[in-house]
Image (tube, helix red, strand yellow):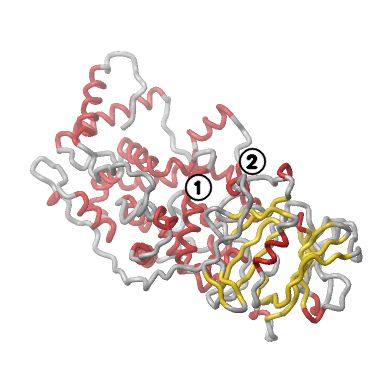
Amino acid sequence: MIYIVYINCVFFSPLKLIFEKEGVYLHTNAKRSNHDTTIPGFIRIVERAGLPALEWSPVEEEGRSAPAVLYTKKVSRRLLASNDRGYKLRPRFPPAGQWSFSLPLSELYSLRRARFSLGRNFLVLTSRGGHPLPALHFHRGGTRELFRALQRYIVLDQSPVDGRLFLAYPHDPGALSQSFEKLQLFDDGGADLVSRFIQDPYATTFGGFSKVTNFFKAALRPPGSPGHFRTAQDPSLPHQCDEEPDFELINCGVELGPRPDVSRGQPLDKWHQFMDPEGRVQDSEKIKEIIFKGGVSPALRKEVWKFLLGFYPWNSTFKEREDILRLKTDEYFRMKVQWKSVSYVQGMSDLLSPLLFVTQNEVESFWCLTGFMELLHQNFEESQEAMKKQLLQLSILLKALDPELCDFLDSQDSGSLCFCFRWLLIWFKREFSFEDILTMWEVIWSGLPCDNFHLLIACSILESQRGELIGSDHDFNTILKHINELTMKLDLQGVLRGAEAIHLQLTQCKELPLKVQQVLGLYSPSSSEEESPDRPAGETQRLLGEAQGGAADASGPARVPTYP
């Protein structure tokens, strides 16, 4: 594709050469041509009329007075492509110069330094309009020198969690671009937002986050927004872990070792044998292991789910559970009278419908949903911090597992993984069949093998699509389309096997990066005592105490209940 954009017509302005490096190649798409797809060229920093720009041109084009692509302001509505910042692109020169470009440094948004598995280093540059330029492959090294030259004009701010990603800022601190937090995702404020959020947190959140689609594409780069990377100290280049003649290694990957083969088990089909004569579950951890490996038999779900979702404590007796059910029923109907009605609208039905299907009971489904929301409520918070954190954690995992896939997604402006947003928001509810999602959720509710197992499921799905993604002519839009079209086409058992195998592979690595350990719960900076997997006996007594208090207050004014 040949592009040009116009601004102020500075094609033949006086040129001052600041930096030049030979041996910088472009690798064009081999699937579109039978010709040589490696084009040697020069990378330069130049000043045109006092304005610095980053330029690349092929060796064969050195006689030209200007590169074939200039990124500038629009002047005509007839230009073919556009973006949100008002920049326009259109074809210009014949094939000899079709890959050249010149990008004013004021329009440089980010640089990603990376290398393919073959060892060749490359840079992916992205303009403030959201358009990635062709990746620049430094066969003879030189990226460090280029960075130093660029810092004469701009600040390159390194991500604290991804040493390969740099965001470009002007030296003027007042010229920072719009950050993710400054997007007004929710136009309405105050009480109306709270009311809409209570009625339908899913619809309210998703409606607001729909505004982020273009912003993700044009501005958000993993692992977050400019506000997340801005620091008071001067930027520094990442530590060079190794160097070899003719090229430099930017970030050395960790050798994870082979991925083990795993198998799924049979669902939990025996229940009462795990209870003592009074009804206490004797080995809840064994039950969770069985559920993790095989799910729950449909005939037992109605009872077992109430334990998984905290409706009943694992160590409660038959009698105590009767009292808890009575308490919860009374509490529910008191709230229903106070609220006039308890309604479930479209958004919450994604989470509620499987619970109602299994319990076949309004009261039990409500309290099971309450337990479920204890796990997911942060996904629907206005700040979206939990969703941004999960996307970042997913990126950390995928970089450790498959850096080449990450590099490809970065090169196609999809490194933010925003196309996984729906997966994480409602735990894959719309990606699998109804019966499959019942199994998936109870597997995740087991809490094994880690709290973030849903992120490993996402990694398993992405790796299952690796060949389709890397082996095709995908861009940002077609990647998003492909991911959306996976709905109802995924093999649940294969995905779960892959996720479990990924966990084993990572945890068996002796040099696992600290960030990955934190995502998997293998390392915590605090030394706080972990809670027991079973609720303590005091939890049951507290619920029973509330039941007695509720009975004593039954004849008095309705009170606002507290929740377990």
Quadrant containing the N terminus in the rendered view? bottom right
Rendered image: mark on residue 92: none
Judged from this view, the residue extending furthest toward the left is 277
Measuring from the top left, give residue 417's x and y in whole percent: 54, 58
10 Å neighbourhood of mark 2: few (<14), some, or many (≥20)?
few
Taking the spot 22% from the left edge, 56% from the top edge, the residue there is 268
Count up the numbered dots.
2
State yes or no: discs 2 and 1 in contact (Cβ < 8 Å).
no
Say what secondary structure mark 1 lies in.
helix
Residue 92 sits above or below residue 215 on the image: below
The span from disc 2 to disc 1 (Cα, nearest Å) is 16 Å
**Residue type beneath disc 2:** Lys
The quarter of the picture where residue 105 lies is bottom right
Q: Which residue is drawn at 48% across and 33% down?
A: 198
Query: In front: 156, or 265?
Result: 156
Residue 189 occupies which quadrant of the picture?
top right
Residue 76 shows in the view: no
Residue marked by disc 2: 182
Observer-nearest of 174 and 449: 174
Pick whichever, 181 or 156, lies toward us: 156
The kind of residue on which mark 1 rests is Met
Regarding mark 2 in the picture, which secondary structure is present there? helix
Q: Where is residue 238 in the image (x, y as percent from the top left)?
A: 57, 60
In which quadrant will I find the C terminus?
A: top left
Tell me what residue is drawn at x 38 percent, y 27 percent. 336
Other-residue count near label 1 (Cα within 10 Å), few / some / many at <14 / 14–19 / ≥20: some
Is 191 displayed left or right of 168 in the figure?
Answer: left
Identify the residue position indicated by label 1 in the image. 387
Residue 206 pos. (x, y %): 55, 45
How far across and down, in percent of the image, does residue 393 sit?
A: 47, 54
